[in-house]
Amino acid sequence: QEYELALAGYATIESRLGLADQDPLKEPLVRTLRELKHLADTVIAFEKIEIQVGGVALYEQRPPVALINGQAYSEGDLLGEELIVHNIRPDQIEFAFRGLILARTLEARP
C-alpha cells in the first residue's frame, strides 16, 4: 500500500518494458506491472477526491441513501465525472472509480 513508492519504482523501469513486452515469457510480468501501476494511479487519484459524508440512511424495503457533499445519493448514482456510488453500508461507502471498487470508511460519531 505504498502507492507513491510503487510509482517511483515503476518509473525506473518503464522505459525498458517495451522490450520485455516482446518476450512471451516476460509479457505476463509486464502486464502485471502495468496493472499495478494503474492500481496505484487510481488509488492516489481517488484519495484526492473530496468526499464529505454527512450520514447514511438505511431503510427497510428501500434502497440506502448517503448524504455526500451535501447531496443525497443512492447506489448507482454518479458523483462527479468518474465516481459511481457502488454500495452503501452503515460503516462505509464503496465507489466504482476507473474500473476499481474503492471504499471510504465513515468516521464513528460519539
Image (tube, rainbow, N blue to C red):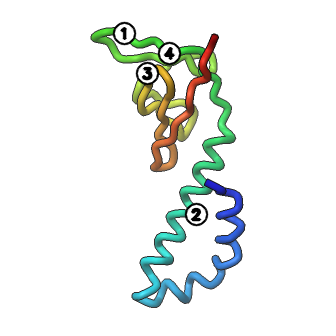
| Amino acid bearing label 3 | Ser
Along the polypeptide, which appears first: circle 3 or circle 1?
1
| Marked residue nearer the N-terminal end (2 or 3) | 2
- The local crowd at label 3, few if under 14, some if 14 to 19, many if 20 or more residues have their Cα within 10 Å, is some
SS class, disc 3: strand
- Residue at (63% x, 29% y) in the render: 51
Packing grade of label 1 (10 A; few <14, some 14-19, many >=20) is few
Q: Residues within 10 Å of mark 2 (few under 14, many from 20)?
A: many
Report the residue that reaches farthest toward the front.
Answer: 110
**For mark 2, what is the residue?**
37
Give the Cα distance between marks 2 and 1: 39 Å
Asked if disc 2 and disc 1 are in contact, CB closer than 8 Å, the reply is: no
Q: Are marks 4 and 2 in contact (CB under 8 Å)?
A: no
Q: Residue at x 42, y 77 (%)?
A: 28
The disc labelled 2 sits on which kind of residue?
Answer: Lys
Give coordinates of residue 5: x percent, y percent. 70, 62
Q: Gap in Å between the C-alphas at discs 3 and 1? A: 12 Å
Q: CA distance from mark 2 to mark 3?
A: 31 Å
Which residue corresponds to mark 1? Answer: 59
Residue on which disc 3 sits: 74
Could you give the CA–CA distance between mark 1 and mark 4, rounded to whole angstroms? Answer: 10 Å
Q: Circles 4 and 3: CB distance less than 8 Å? A: no
Q: Nearer the viewer, mark 3 or mark 1?
A: 1
Residue at horizontal 47 percent and vertical 40 percent from the top? 96
- Mark 2 or mark 1, earlier in chain: 2
Name the mark on residue 56. Answer: 4
How many discs appear?
Answer: 4
* Residue 9 percent coordinates (x, y): 68, 70
- Looking at the rendered image, the disc whose residue lies closer to the viewer, 4 or 3, is 4
Kind of residue sitting beneath label 1: Tyr
